Amino acid sequence: MKPIYLDNNSTTKIDKRVLDKIIPFLTDHYGNPSSTEHPFGWEANDSINKSREQISKLINCSPNEIIFTSGATESNNISILGVLNKNKKEQKHAITAITEHKSILDVFDYASKNGTSTTYLNVNKNGMIDIDELKDSITNKTKLISIMLANNEIGVIQPIDDISQICKEKNITLHVDAAQALGKINIDVRNTKIDMISFSSHKIYGPKGVGCLYINRKTMKDRISPIIFGGGHERGLRPGTLALHNIVGFGEACEIARKNMNQDIANIDILQNIFLKKLQDKYPALIINGDIDNRIAGNLNISFPSLGGKSLIKRLTKIAVSSGSACTSASPEPSHVLKAIGLSTSLIHSTIRIGIGKFNTRDELDIAAEHILEVITNMKN
Ligand SMILES: *Cc1c(COP(=O)(O)O)cnc(C)c1O
């Protein structure tokens, strides 16, 4: 039997309604949205536009501020390198945080080897950056700040409104990785001053291999240059034939999120609280990693002290959870995020990330809690 899926921060099961919308675009509606000479192309282009509208409604921006990409990793690359590549000769400084996703950190690493000076902000033991440290690290060369909205490992939400205020005052371009926040918290682009935001479809019950970049007019016009070339699609920032079926699916996933998000998140919250209480009743010493007040629903990153650093995840055969971020767990390195908030390597081994999603049931979480408690009891004996 397959384990119970509790790894919804890594990816999510596609929503049936999304799948139903996608299928016809893999069969009958195969036109190229760039074909302007015939109905196959017109129809495809209409469907792309509809998806653009569905997404822009969820985040409150204009449809022409959406650039389709293959996912948040690509959006992060296009936005960060694109801004740093503009006026290449100019000395530039860029700021991010040590707990970002690898698709930010690796891009910053590349940029720092290619002439950009970089600053990595620390986080406190709750995983939050310090606004004063951010302010102090800004120089007259600072062109870009990239801070994630919600962390993929520990779920904490950074104070993006404060950061965007600072960026606006200092005229610095702000990029935000919101792959974990979309569909979980309200994102209102109009009412914040964020210049670029990365999104992914497969974290919100849409298909894999598609995402988008929100980019505002000012940044599009004056502050970015492309890093991929050919054909001029997506306002020249992301050329290549659009992945019509995936884009249609992503749009539908966003529409479902817009209509059902509040209810779904409320349900996830209830399940999460019942689950956590069960664990805490039997194991009061457990530690929830990441700020308890500023966090997305469904993410529980939990350390179990007193297991003597023994690997917990290997023994949890009935549930599919993560030991850290999925992107780093292929290598045995302890998670950079858990290290950043001060966890010892030993405690990191006894840490799991539980990602509860909208398809999880009360029954599943009851079984999961009992399984975890049973495994822990056996490990202590
Ligand atoms: C999943 C994730 C990404 C990568 O998104 P893909 O669409 O899989 O490339 C980037 N950042 C964060 C915070 C994520 O959770």
Image (cartoon, rainbow, N blue to C red):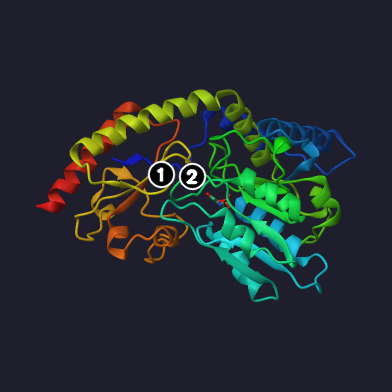
In the image, 2: left or right of 239? left
Judging depth in this view, the residue of 44 and 296 nearest the camera is 296
Residue at position x 43%, y 37% from top?
298
Q: Is residue 12 above or below residue 329?
A: above
As helix, strand or loop, the secondary structure at mark 2 comes to: loop
Label 2 environment density (alpha carbons within 10 Å; few <14, some 14–19, many ≥20): many
As helix, strand or loop, the secondary structure at mark 1 comes to: loop
Label 1 environment density (alpha carbons within 10 Å; few <14, some 14–19, many ≥20): many
The x and y percentages for residue 171 are 77, 55
The x and y percentages for residue 18 are 58, 31
In this view, the residue farthest toward the left is: 381
Residue 229 visible, this angle: yes
Label 2 CB less than 8 angstroms from ligand 1: yes
Do the numbered discs 2 and 1 sit on residues whose CB atoms are within 8 Å? yes
Residue 32 visible, this angle: no
> Which quadrant of the rendered structure holds the N terminus?
top left
Q: Is residue 198 above or below residue 188?
A: below
Q: Which residue is mark 2?
A: 11
- Report how far apart the C-alphas of labels 2 and 1 lie in the structure: 7 Å
Q: Which residue is mark 1?
A: 7
Q: Which of the labelled discs sits on residue 84, or is there none?
A: none
Give the amino acid type for the residue marked by disc 2 in the picture.
Thr
In the image, 105: left or right of 189? left
Judging depth in this view, the residue of 279 and 287 nearest the camera is 287
The x and y percentages for residue 218 are 83, 49
Residue at position x 30%, y 47% from top?
287
The x and y percentages for residue 124 are 45, 56
Judging depth in this view, the residue of 291 and 276 nearest the camera is 291
Q: Is residue 12 above or below residue 360?
A: below
In the image, 112: left or right of 181? right
Give the amino acid type for the residue marked by disc 1 in the picture.
Asp
